[in-house]
Amino acid sequence: MFSMKLIKQLLLVILVFSAQNILAQENGSLFLSAETLKKTALSFGVEQAYVEYSHPDCFSTANWKYHPGDDKAWKETAFNDSSWKLFHTDFNLDSIPKGEWQGIGWFRLKLVIDSNLYDQSLALVMTQFGASEIYFDGKLVNQYGIPSKDPFLEKTFRPLNFQPVIVSLDEKSEHLLAVRYSFHQAQSLLDKYNKKYLFKTLHFGYPGFMMNIGSSKGAVKLFGDSLFKNLLLAIITFIALLLIGIFHTSFFIFYSSDRSNLYLAIFNFTVAAFSFSEWLPSYSHLSLQAAILNNLFAGIIWNFWLPVSMLAYYSVFYRKLPWHVWIYFAVILFMFSDLIFNSTISYPIYKWFMYVAFADMLRLFVKSVINREKNVWIVGVGVILSQSCWMLYLNSTVDWINTEFIVYCILLVVPVSLLIFNASRTAETSKSLEKQLVEVTRLSDLSLTKEREKQQILTSQKSVLEHQVNERTADLNQSLEDLKSTQSQLIQSEKMASLGELTAGIAHEIQNPLNFVNNFSEVNTELIGEMEEEIDKGNLDEAKKIAKDIRENQQKINQHGKRADSIVKGMLQHSRSSSGIKELTDINLLADEFLRLSYHGLRAKDKSFNASLKTDFDPAVGKIRVVTEEIGRVILNLLNNAFYAVTERKKLNAEGYEPTVTIGTKMVGDRIEIRVSDNGYGIPQKVLDKIFQPFFTTKPTGQGTGLGLSLSYDIITKGHDGQLMVETNEGVGSTFIINLPYNNQTL
Amino acid sequence: MKKILVVDDERDIQMLFEQHFRKEIKSGEMEFSFSFSGEEALEFMKNPEHKAILILSDINMPGMSGLELLKHIKEKYEKPPPVVMMITAYGDGENYNLAMKLGADDFLTKPLDFSSLKEKLKTMVL
């Protein structure tokens, strides 16, 4: 509307120049008839200037006669004003010839009444910022403020819009309207604002006055409408805009990631501010200064209308604001340049941008409709309605509609449509959120169920697994037990195997002493016979000699008997399960005994075999505390291996090879060493680290249990706190070293 | 006089022979020498003073076995090689065949039957 006012004022400026001349030729009189009044009553609009120029014959401000100064006689009908000049009552700085306005002056207008108006009444509607007294036929009919020659006594007053003064007509055809008007501040105020702000073209306020003359009935109705209906509309519009703005602001505050609410709020506040500055002054007694400032404010706000509305509109249709929204802001610069430089270039530019903006709005609207965006038609309806109102308003000669109403339509329709659309969109968002919530709930329920199922499956699997594990464990325990018993059986059979190897040796070892026992007994039998013979002969010396031999032989018999006895005992000891009791044992003797046992055992099996036996016993070793049968078993095992090694090498019939097995003992610090060496092939490096593993054997299947060394290792390391080591040199031989702590303490 | 070398690793065998052949030794009919290993026997025989014409050797001995000793004797002493009688605790065919093949003159098993051995030595025509 402000633009409308602007436009109209621009037009007015142009028209004034053209129309002024025509009207100025009227002779300070105005012809009134029932028809003209009817016309004016209908068109009594907000925009006086506009109405005025639509009906110049009844609202002329131009055919008044004027005289500066103050003289009470000038109110009289009889006064001859033929020497007065014609003057515009709504004078402004430009229209006042220099020095013509001196703060107070008189305006006179002769009314020529048609006979159809006799005995009727007229409404005089005054618009002013100064102070005035209105005289009709020389009588004071109304006074606004206190006009005075003295600026300090003057009291200016702006009447409410459309406030009428009713005067009665008699049957005279001529009447005189005289206005005593004073406004001392006018010149200085206008000079001040015009100079200061350079707003020369835009006349924000008139220091002069306008008097509209119409039918009293129409004017009264208009005044009532204006005061109640229009004011109410204005207030409602203002509050509605404010509320919508607050609504969007709250939305933005509580959900600031959606900026469209911010832009919508700005838009609404802009429109609200504009509506306030545009309309509320019409219903108040503003001073000219306040009116000028208000209009200035409205002008500035108005400039923001287009960019701000486009901002709001785009924010609704775009997720991210398009760059071209800033073009509309750029247009403001033109608008301000108009304000500042007193130019008129902005209007055509602005007009084109209006079209562009409208086209773009339509484009977005159509696009959204094509994209089947829900409820977007609301915005479309709003924009179209608003544009239609603009059109209507621009052609407001149509008198069947209340222009005020149109104006409010224009003000409210777009914000409301955007509000509704935004609300619907928010509702859509909420609905979709609700749907998603339902979906999410469903999914979470589903996942919960799945989770539970999983849990159940896991639990059942766990119990199955536990069960299986228990079963397996039981199986394993059983297997372990079986293995243990198998192992002990194996150990036993290993013992028996090594014993078996010994059997022949043992037989030989027992046979030899037995042979001696037998042979010496035989010899003794013979010798006893000879001795008897000698005794009979009385050859006692000889008999004594024989008796001595017999005694010696008897000792040999005894000796060899013991030897056989110890062999049998040793064999028993070997086959017996270990007692585990450590006793003082002569290591050298033990080693020697088992060397012989082993050697003869091998001889018994392989008659062709022979080997050199070497012993290297350190007498210092003496007796130490060991489990005799276990250590014996280890020595036997090592010796058997040694003999096996040299036998294997011997089989190759290498020239000059003399199989040799050596057993020796040695004190090394506080420990003793038993070394069993052979000059066999040695142990290949690749099997060296396996030889102490159970069941590892290099012997052909059936010949070795593979347990000998592993058992020996256990006996030495676990049972005797000792070490079993091997030194080997391929092609040269091997030496097994038993290292035992020297322990001869009795328990 | 028959000179006899006895080779055995059992030292008590010397005493046994000396007692059994007391009379023969006393009468100078027989003379016994003793070696306790094959190597010792060979060393003994290297001595040109030795007059042993009969060797009694045990087969089972540590080091050089009786059979090896036999082999040495039969190979080295061609004219006239001494009579070698092998004695063993194991009278099995294998040892016997091997001994015979190597040129053993007799094969005796332990325990020795000294009276029959005495008969054999006495009647043996050397």
Image (cartoon, rainbow, N blue to C red):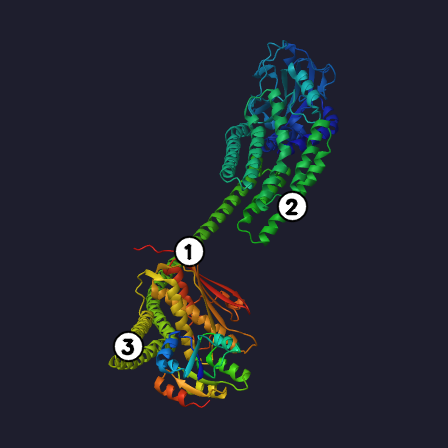
Point 50% across, 46% down: residue? A424
Q: CA distance from mark 2 to mark 1?
A: 108 Å
Q: Indicate the chain on which mark 1 is placed.
A: A
For the residue marked with disc 2, what is the amino acid?
Asp
Q: Position of residue A254 (x, y in %)?
A: 49, 38
Point 71% across, 37% down: residue? A349
Seen as rendered, the residue at the extreme front is A538
Secondary structure of the residue carrying numbered label 1: strand
Q: Which residue is mark 3?
A: A543
* Mark 3 or mark 1, earlier in chain: 3
Q: Which residue is mark 1?
A: A671
Q: Indicate the chain on which mark 3 is placed.
A: A
For the residue marked with disc 3, what is the amino acid?
Ala
* Mark 2 or mark 3, earlier in chain: 2
Q: Residues within 10 Å of mark 3 (few under 14, many from 20)?
A: many
Quadrant housing residue A718: bottom left
Label number found at residue A360: 2
The quadrant of the picture occupied by the N terminus of chain A is top right
For the residue marked with disc 1, what is the amino acid?
Arg
